[in-house]
Image (tube, rainbow, N blue to C red):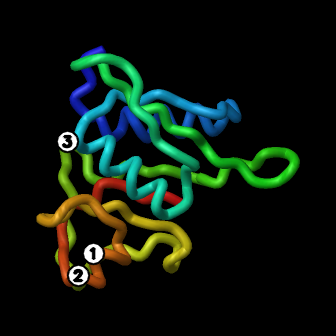
Amino acid sequence: MAANDTIADMLTRIRNANMARHQTTQVPATKMTRSIAKVLREEGFIAEVDEAGEGIKRNLVISLKYKGKNRQPLITALKRVSKPGLRVYSNRKELPRVLGGIGIAIISTSSGIMTDREARRQNLGGEVLCHVW
């Protein structure tokens, strides 16, 4: 599959796995997907991230988190903001607040991928990759 939007692909795979209540899902491993997975893990949206596969065919195995007896997914929604056809940038004063701070926006800044909260703390703006809540 020649997906040129690896981020949207990743979000869709996580979304689908969540809907189907899967324990894990696989995403092609790139620098970008690794960083996003790391942020999601640090924010507690996913349990853990492992790598599987050889060389160029490496995949990230993402373990999803659910809560309660009926296994409600912790991630309610993943939304791609900046797309290849329409990039969305935000300076440090205009960083989005997702659901009044309940959710996170994942921002690609000059010093790496981080949440909107972290970017605000470091006084950085950047490309708004996606919203998660």
Identify whether 10 is placed above or below 116: above
Mark earlier in primary sequence (3, 2): 3
Q: Quadrant of residue 30?
A: top left
Residue 65: x, y in percent? 64, 48
Could you tell whether 46 is left or right of 30 in the image?
right
Query: Given the image, on which type of amino acid does mark 1 rest?
Result: Ala
| Nearer to the camera, 87 or 101 | 101
Could you tell whether 35 is left or right of 63 in the image?
left
| Residue in the picture at 40% in, 47% down | 37
Query: Given the image, on which type of amino acid does mark 3 rest?
Result: Pro
Cα–Cα span, label 1 and label 2 = 5 Å
Q: Which mark is residue 122?
A: 2
| Nearer to the camera, 28 or 6 | 28
Element type where label 2 sits in the image: loop
Q: Which mark is residue 70?
A: none
| Residue in the picture at 22% in, 29% down | 4
Between label 3 and label 2, give the one nearer the viewer: 2
Cα–Cα span, label 1 and label 3 = 22 Å
Element type where label 1 sits in the image: helix
Residue sitting farthest toward the right: 69
Could you tell whether 97 is left or right of 7 in the image?
right
Query: Given the image, on which type of amino acid does mark 2 rest?
Result: Gln
Residue 127: x, y in percent? 20, 60
Tag 1–tag 2 contact (CB < 8 Å): yes
Q: Which mark is residue 84?
A: 3
Between label 1 and label 3, give the one nearer the viewer: 1
| Figure quadrant of the N terminus | top left
| Residue in the picture at 39% in, 64% down | 105
Classify 10 Å Cα crowding around label 3: few (below 14), some (14-19), many (20 and above): few
Residue picked out by circle 1: 119
Mark earlier in primary sequence (1, 3): 3
Identify whether 64 is placed above or below 118: above
